[in-house]
Structure formats: C-alpha cells, structure tokens
Image: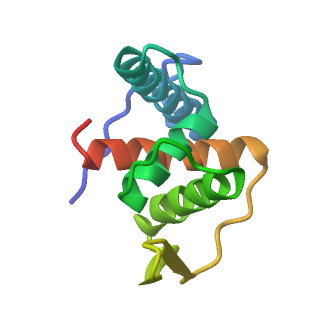
Amino acid sequence: MLQVLSVPCILCLESSYHYLCNMTDAQNDLQTRWWNLEAKLAERFSKKPDMEAILFLIGIQEFGEIRKKFNKEQKQDLMHVAVCSLFAQSGYYEIEKVDEDGWPHFRQLKSLPIMNMIEQENFLKDHILLYFDNAGF
C-alpha cells in the first residue's frame, strides 16, 4: 500500500498538498534551470543569448553544417529545424527526410497542446533544457 506523507507547503505553510503551490514550485525550478543554462551559454559565448539565439544554435547543431553566413530565410529555417527537433523529443515530430542540400524535413505526429503565451514559452524552455541535458551540456 502506498503511503502519502503530509509535507507542509512551502508557499502557504499548510500541511496539505496544493496543486497551485506545486505548479509554482515547478515554474521556479524551470526558471532556475533556465537561468543556469543562460549563464553557461553566456560563459561559452561571452554574451547572454536570447531565445532566438538559442534556437539558432540548436538549428545549426541539428543541420550539422557550420557556415560563415546564413541568409535570412536560412536563419528562419534553422530555427524551424530547432523547434521541430526539440518537440521530436516528446513525440510531436519526426524526421521525414533530409533533402539533397542536407536540410531535414519533419512530419508532425500529433498536435501540440493548446497553451497561452507563457505556457508556450515554458513548454519551449523545458524542451530546450531537455535538449541540452541530453547533449551533456
């Protein structure tokens, strides 16, 4: 038989389980892990990257070819590759093929959940953190 321990909630100090308090704990943990990743990337690149820069880096990694210059369309494509690669970790996408120029093309396997803007950002951050964890960064 599973025994549930009663632990006081750190936000309201009551001795019961609180869904919203635990959600806040999870958000705080996500934010702390995000700040740690930003700090590592800033140390590595001498500049704190924004979300677009992080997606660009992931896109280059997944594309597998480093070039001195990418045009605007290629930069957008790299960020698309990044997002699809990130969500492939959770089964939302899979690589369908790689074209003759080396660009991966993805197939969507299931719909993404409906979320507000903050939830979307946190969903993306969580997948970015998973990506870097899996890469051993």
Left or right: 88 as drawn, with respect to 134: right
Q: Residue at x 59, y 18 (%)?
A: 12
Residue at 44% x, 51% y is 60
Residue 27, picture quadrant? top right
Of 22 and 33, nearer the camera is 33
In the visual, does 33 lie left or right of 105? left
**Residue 33, located in which quarter of the rendered image?**
top left
Image quadrant holding the N terminus, namely bottom left
Across and down, in percent, residue 105 comes to 52, 78
Between 81 and 7, the one lying in front of the other is: 81
What percent of the width, then of the height, locates residue 39?
Answer: 42, 17
**Residue 75 spot, x, y in % from top left:** 62, 51
Q: Quadrant of residue 45?
A: top left
Residue at point 58% right, 81% down? Answer: 110
Please tell me whether residue 122 is drawn above or below residue 106 in the rendered image.
above
Seen at 47% across and 58% down, the residue is 86
Where is 130 relative to 64, above or below? above
Residue 98 sits above or below residue 51 on the image: below
- 53 or 85, which lies in front? 53
Residue 42: give x, y in percent of width and height.
44, 18
